[in-house]
């Protein structure tokens, strides 16, 4: 007898449809999945062609599910929920928690604090991923992420503010000599400048012209260069607090307009509790969150 059952659609098309149907916006779905908006639209079109019917009505802003699309989405979402639950169950024996953080957060804050976390959870393997890429918690198998970002956050995520960015100008005491108080822009302009991908100095001096000095692709490298006395750097205060307290760096002034993004602790909302994950989440908040009066 001939098999008349229709073949299953591609998994990527179903993932795009599930995210788009949940967010009712291709751009928001693309952010959740870590792909381009065009890729989401293409996968949805492939699914509609596979099924032979429209699943969305395109609107000026966003999309809406058709009646058939709404029915199909409810079932597809349920299927993904079952898969995620099954994966969680089979992974319960793996006592590990994966934290994804930015490279600067890793080198300046996380690594030096890990011994205290290991003391709290000696039998749990803590995996650390240093990247600036947007996290897809399911695809990347990440439990907690720390990102330089801003609200709003997807409805399926929990997010807590760790600290707001307070940008300051810092330099090695040997470079700054006996300077006390804030330096004037004219004085700073005569000194060697250290750059990163933010373009802080252009904002500080109100220019789009290229300014002399080495350029680093990570903030942590600019901080290391400042510690070595190679120049002045604009950095977020949270990353150099210990260096300022120990006198390895000196604050030479404020630098406004650095970024409209702050550092947040983010995780996917869980259907059930994982004690190790909850402990790491609480530890991150206790360790890295600035007091309310310091925000």
Image (spheres, rainbow, N blue to C red):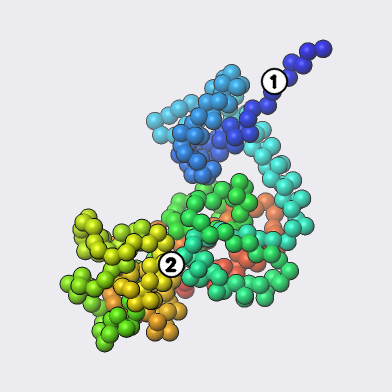
- 37 over 124 or under it: above or below: above
> Does dot 2 land on a helix, a strand or a loop?
helix
Q: Nearer the viewer, residue 217 or 8?
A: 217
- Res. 282 in view: yes
Neighbours of disc 1 within 10 Å: few (<14), some (14-19), many (20+): few
Which mark lies nearer to you, 1 or 2? 2
N-terminal label among 1 and 2: 1
Name the residue at 38% across, 71% down: 225
Name the residue at 43% across, 84% down: 246
Residue matched to label 2? 220
The quarter of the displayed image where residue 95 is located? bottom right
Residue matched to label 1? 6
Residue 164: image x %, image y %?
Answer: 41, 65
Left or right: 242, with 16 as reference point: left
- Res. 180 in view: no
Outermost top residue: 1
Outermost bottom residue: 178
Name the residue at 74% across, 15% down: 4
Residue 154: image x %, image y %?
Answer: 51, 48
């Amino acid at each position: 007898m001939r098999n008349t059952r229709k073949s299953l659609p591609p998994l990527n098309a179903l993932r795009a449809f599930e995210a788009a149907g949940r967010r009712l916006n291709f751009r928001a779905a693309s952010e959740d999945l870590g792909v381009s908006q065009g890729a989401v639209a293409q996968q949805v079109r492939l699914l509609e062609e596979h099924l032979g019917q429209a699943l969305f009505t395109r609107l000026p802003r966003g999309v809406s599910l058709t009646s058939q699309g709404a029915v199909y989405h409810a079932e597809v979402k349920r299927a993904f929920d079952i898969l995620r639950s099954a994966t969680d169950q089979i992974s319960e024996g793996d006592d590990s928690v994966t934290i994804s953080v930015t490279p600067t957060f890793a080198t300046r804050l996380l690594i030096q604090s890990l011994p205290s976390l290991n003391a709290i959870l000696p039998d749990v393997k803590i995996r650390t991923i240093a990247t600036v890429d947007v996290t897809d918690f399911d695809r990347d198998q990440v439990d907690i992420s720390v990102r330089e970002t801003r609200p709003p956050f997807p409805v399926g995520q929990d997010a807590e503010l760790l600290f707001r960015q307070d940008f300051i100008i810092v330099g090695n005491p040997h470079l700054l000599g006996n300077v006390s108080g804030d330096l004037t822009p004219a004085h700073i302009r005569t000194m060697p400048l250290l750059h990163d991908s933010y373009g802080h100095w252009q904002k500080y001096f109100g220019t789009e012209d290229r300014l002399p000095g080495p350029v680093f692709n990570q903030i942590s490298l600019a901080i290391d260069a400042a510690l070595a006395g190679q120049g002045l750097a604009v950095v977020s205060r949270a990353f150099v607090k210990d260096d300022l307290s120990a006198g390895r760096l000196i604050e030479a002034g404020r630098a406004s307009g650095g970024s409209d993004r702050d550092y947040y602790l983010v995780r996917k909302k869980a259907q059930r509790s994982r004690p190790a994950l909850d402990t790491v989440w609480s530890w991150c908040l206790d360790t890295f969150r600035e007091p309310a009066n310091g925000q």
